Amino acid sequence: MSIMKTIKIFDTTLRDGEQSPGASMNIEEKLRIASQLEKLNVDVIEAGFPIASDGDFEAVKKIAQTIKGPEIAGLCRANIKDIDRAWEALKYAGDRGRIHTFIATSDIHMERKLQMKPAKVLETAVKAVKHAVSYTPNVEFSCEDAVRTRLEFLAEMVEAVIDAGATTVNIPDTVGYSIPFEYFNIIKYLKDNVPNIDKAVISVHCHNDLGLAVANSLAAIQAGAGQVECTINGIGERAGNCSLEEIVMALRTRRDIMPFENSINTEHIYAASRLLSTVTGIAVQPNKAVVGANAFAHEAGIHQHGVLMDKETYEIMTPESIGLNANKLVLGKHSGRHAFVARLNELGYDLPKEDVEKAFVRFKSLADKKKEIFDEDLDAIVADEIIRIPEIVKLVQMNVSSGSFAAPTATVELEVKGKVKRVAVIGDGPVDATFKAIKKLTGMKPYLVNYSVGSITGGTDALGECTVRLEHDGHEVLGQGSHSDIIVASAKAYINALNKALDVAQRTRVEI
Ligand code: KIV
Ligand code: ZN
């Protein structure tokens, strides 16, 4: 009987994923995501880029101290200072700590960005790996822009860093340029031409600029790669990374022709996807594979008929396999604490007692106004009451008058760094007046990039959800708020974005 090869799942939601515009997360939020990744049982969590900022460092350290199952990786450039700083945070994970160091290897990057000759780049990489190995044998080296690197040089580099002690070599498609056939051949070339290749795991890291990240990763696995780098919901630089849920479900669904195992507890996928959207405010498109709202919805009559007769007519995987419970339990005003907590747990929220209490109070008040409470309402409650705090700026109360004959006026009371302040401001409309009042009270002057409103569920009693994208001091941040009054939801979203902007400002990052 042949033993199936196991593909390691390396999740970089907290590092590459965080590089998505507006996706920056604070330590608390990163820890929540890391716990969910632990439940998913990923092999490696790339927790951040420790030298990038003090906030990144603290987050990596906290995750290394707290998370028990997966290995914890930290990214660093190929220099001594970055590596020392990374290990300083990673050492708390003991032998599960992984140093991930990288340097660009393509001609265009070496000439124009690094302004270094190939021989110098090779020497720098080897020196960095040797230094990393002095801390831990668990060292990953990435050849940034590997896909556009001359193959002979790529092979030379891979051989040298393995000799220096790297146990994982990553071959990224940094700019999302490759196609499956070409990427297969690159991995195959390395397998065939690097004499010591069997001493390391080949990793792949694909960006999705041409929508091919998952397809390329699958091709690489078929060519011999043993690790896939991916993110929840496929978030990441520009068009994002290979999506974890898609690659894992593709491997699982097509095991008939791809005989590979992985460690993922797929029934936690849906909760991971929702949690990430809630934390970052980045919604999943409805037609997104695996986790989109329509992924298991069979609208067309002919499909519905087929599914009712036999699920396998149109369903290649079950909603239950990703933790999506088809029999949604709807809560209402008579639902007790027990049913409420049970549903939260099913949705993947494992909250401490005091957070459950806060959420339950808000649930009861919503249930008084709204007949049925759906999962989406619970997400909004958890996001509003638990995830979006701690806040430097807090909404205390507000009142807005508007209509067709009086000037729209917003009276807003905020607590800013512990001090309560109130102001009344006239605007072009109720939202404009509200935002102007908040700006006046905080003294912040962000640029409003985008503002959108939606309803979380159907019906006129539905919770309104507002998303605000702001630019402040060169950073883009995304805020969300929900309330049955859409102007209050707008104020909450604006304040949430301001809090994120204040948090980001404290964590000045170095650019990769
Ligand atoms: O895309 C890339 O090349 C990266 C590396 C730093 C691994 O993210
Ligand atoms: Zn990347």
Image (cartoon, rainbow, N blue to C red):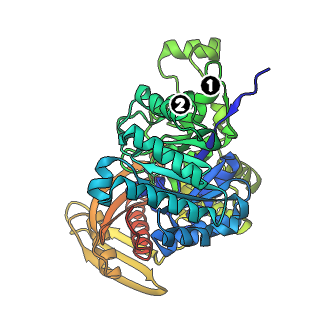
Residue 192: image tag: 2
Quarter holding residue 121: bottom left
Name the residue carrying label 1: 253
Residue type at mark 2 is Asp
**Residue at disc 2, secondary structure:** helix
Instruction: Give the image location of residue 280, x and y in percent.
Output: 47, 56
Quarter holding residue 496: bottom left
Residue 202: image tag: none
Q: Is residue 231 visible?
A: no
Most extreme residue toward the bottom is 419
Residue occupying the point 47% across, 67% down: 79
**Residue at disc 1, secondary structure:** helix
The one nearer the camera, 255 or 356, is 255
Instruction: Give the image location of residue 172, x and y in percent.
Output: 45, 44
The one nearer the camera, 110 or 332, is 110
Is the residue marked by circle 2 packed among few (<14), some (14-19), or many (20+) residues within 10 Å?
few
Residue occupying the point 65% across, 56% down: 138
Instruction: Give the image location of residue 174, x and y in percent.
Output: 40, 46
How far apart marks 2 and 1 lie (CA) works out to 29 Å
The one nearer the camera, 175 or 15, is 175
Residue occupying the point 42% across, 71% down: 504
Quarter holding residue 59: bottom right
Q: Earlier in the sequence, mark 2 or mark 1?
A: 2
The quadrant the N terminus occupies is top right
